[in-house]
Amino acid sequence: MPTILTSIAQAAPTIAMLGFFACLIGGTTMIVKRRDTKKGVLLLIMSLVLLGNVLVWTL
């Protein structure tokens, strides 16, 4: 595999974990402040999907 693809593949789980924490914090904030509960719940579900993807990639 070319070097550039290897470095991108190594960075993907890190980037996904940053997205996980961003969605987790954003979803929790939306629910607690009662801005848009439906979107907050969707963000929490998305964060769990991202976490699952990272677990699959790394195992």
Image: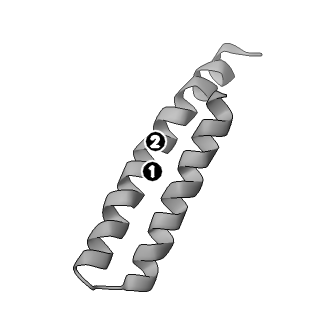
Residue at the image position 77 percent from the left and 16 percent from the top: 1
User: In the image, is residue 50 above or below residue 9?
Assistant: below
Q: Position of residue 51 (x, y in %)?
A: 54, 47
Residue at the image position 67 percent from the left and 38 percent from the top: 56
User: In the image, is residue 28 above or below residue 38?
Assistant: above
Which quadrant of the view contains residue 25? bottom left
Q: Residue tagged by mark 1?
A: 20
Which quadrant of the view contains residue 32? bottom left
Q: Secondary structure beneath disc 2?
A: helix
**Number of residue marks:** 2
Give the amino acid type for the residue marked by disc 2 in the picture.
Met
Which quadrant of the figure contains the C terminus?
Answer: top right
Residue projecting furthest to the right: 1
Give the amino acid type for the residue marked by disc 1 in the picture.
Phe
Q: Position of residue 14 (x, y in %)?
A: 47, 33
Q: CA distance from mark 1 to mark 2?
A: 5 Å
CB of mark 1 within 8 Å of CB of mark 2? Answer: yes
Residue at the image position 59 percent from the left and 55 percent from the top: 49
Q: Position of residue 20 (x, y in %)?
A: 45, 50
